[in-house]
Image (spheres, helix red, strand yellow):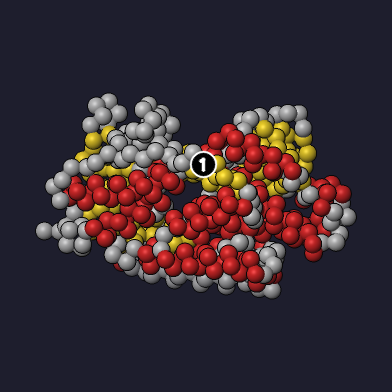
Amino acid sequence: MNPPRIVVVGAGHVGLYAALRLSKKLNRNQAEIVVIDPVPHMTYQPFLPEAAAGNISPRHAVVPLRRELKKCRIVSGEVTKLEHARKTVTIQPIDGPAYEMEYDHIIVAPGSVSRTLPIPGLSDIGIGLKTIGEAIYLRNHILDRLDVAAVTPDEEVRKASLNFVFVGGGFAGIEALAEMQDVVSDALKYYPELDPKEVHFILVEATNRILPEVGPEMGAYAARQLAARGIDLRLGTFLQSCVDGKIVLSDGDSFRAETLVWTAGVKPSPMLANTDLPLGPRGHVNCLPTLQVADNDTSEPLDGAWSAGDCAQVPDLTNPGGWCSPSAQHAVRQAKVLADNIAQVIRGGAPVEYRHKHVGGVAGLGINKGVAHVYGIKVKGYPAWLMHRFYHVSRIPSFNRKIRVVADWVLAFLFKRETVALGQLHRPREDFLEVTPPVALPAEKAPEKKVTAASR
């Protein structure tokens, strides 16, 4: 008899940690663990701003699945359909035809995607910050804008190249904004043609506060620090249009910019629309505190269906009536409980409820600057920056990655920051194509018509 198959959809914080823990608690005779993800690595998203800034190597902000999950079967592909009524998933591999896979238990953890709005021009010039590719592109793009501004004779192009707009005042937006301003400040030392006063970083945030995760006092401190660095904070303001790089804001201001970074929240993966799982009003998978997927009407758990993280609405038992926030803090802890519960159920036991009181948050504001509000203790400046780094290096999976990240930080401390754009990474074949003109294939010889008895 084959052991029960556990399929993990998505290899983000929940998928990777749950699969890793399951592989340690259950041997191959007790369960087969299959992890399905289109990319071969898990991205540690809190490190994306530092990867974009060049503080750490982009390769060190990701965790290779096959190296970390040696006892699991890795499937490089995308789940295009999930039918829990039949306990099957349809997998579209990187290459080749789609196929179905049956399972006994499934962990639905495809994570989230950027939550965008129907703003004219956003799809043409907007840059997200959810993947390592976007982080690399953002760095190259911003440094490339400095090169453009330094040589262009067009004053309008120069101004637009030196306007950097960030939309969203949460962790991702503020940390990326602060880090990239540090990058530009360092790079300007090598651009005598540019006056630092010409560079403008603008934050557009719909609410009247930033970094709500660290509380109003620390959020206000962070805003003052950013403003003191010359960053233009547009709080209580919406982006209305950005067609052809013309930024139009709800406060009546408009200007041209060639950089627009969108970090205004997330929404559940659209993959969930192709499942028969019960979803909540915002598109999240409906879960019980045990992290079992539950029927919307009866609240009864579905046999073998589990979910957690950004794509799930999990009741927060420490805040009755509320839901667990879509943060790495909850995702990592939920993954542990989820894996333990599945192992318990396979062994004939009962699942336990997930309970964790949010302990606060830490945020970096660039090199040597940060804010933190943890267990009611408020910290700012250099100590908060150290807390931010120590916390995240402790959270990234694998000892290998921890050492590499720390080594990157040490090298960044000892030597000057690298401010080189490698824009050709995004168009690697252009130079080759310029010297390799297309060659027309000779016309194929038409096949001779065979004369058969039927054609006579």
Taking the image as drawn, is residue 3 in sight? Answer: yes
Q: Nearer the viewer, residue 83 or 281?
A: 281
Residue lying at 23% horizontally and 35% vertically, measured from the top left: 301
Residue that label 1 marks: 377
State left or right for residue 290 relative to residue 374: left
* Residue 294 vertical position relative to residue 425 in the rendered view, above or below: above
Image-based side of 295 in relation to 393, left or right:
left
Q: Is residue 267 above or below residue 5?
A: above
State the quadrant of the C terminus. Answer: bottom left
Q: Is residue 370 above or below residue 210?
A: below
On the image, the x and y values in percent for residue 426 come to 62, 61
Residue drawn at 64 percent across, 41 percent down: 222
Point out the residue furthest to the front here. 377
Give the residue displayed 65% in from the left and 69% down from the top. Answer: 414
Please state if 57 lies on the left or on the right of 235 as rendered.
left
Q: Circle 1 — which element?
A: strand
What kind of residue is marked 1? Ile
Residue 84 in sight in this render: no
Q: Residue at x 66, y 59 (%)?
A: 140
Say above or below: 398 vs 298: below
> In front: 197, or 114?
197
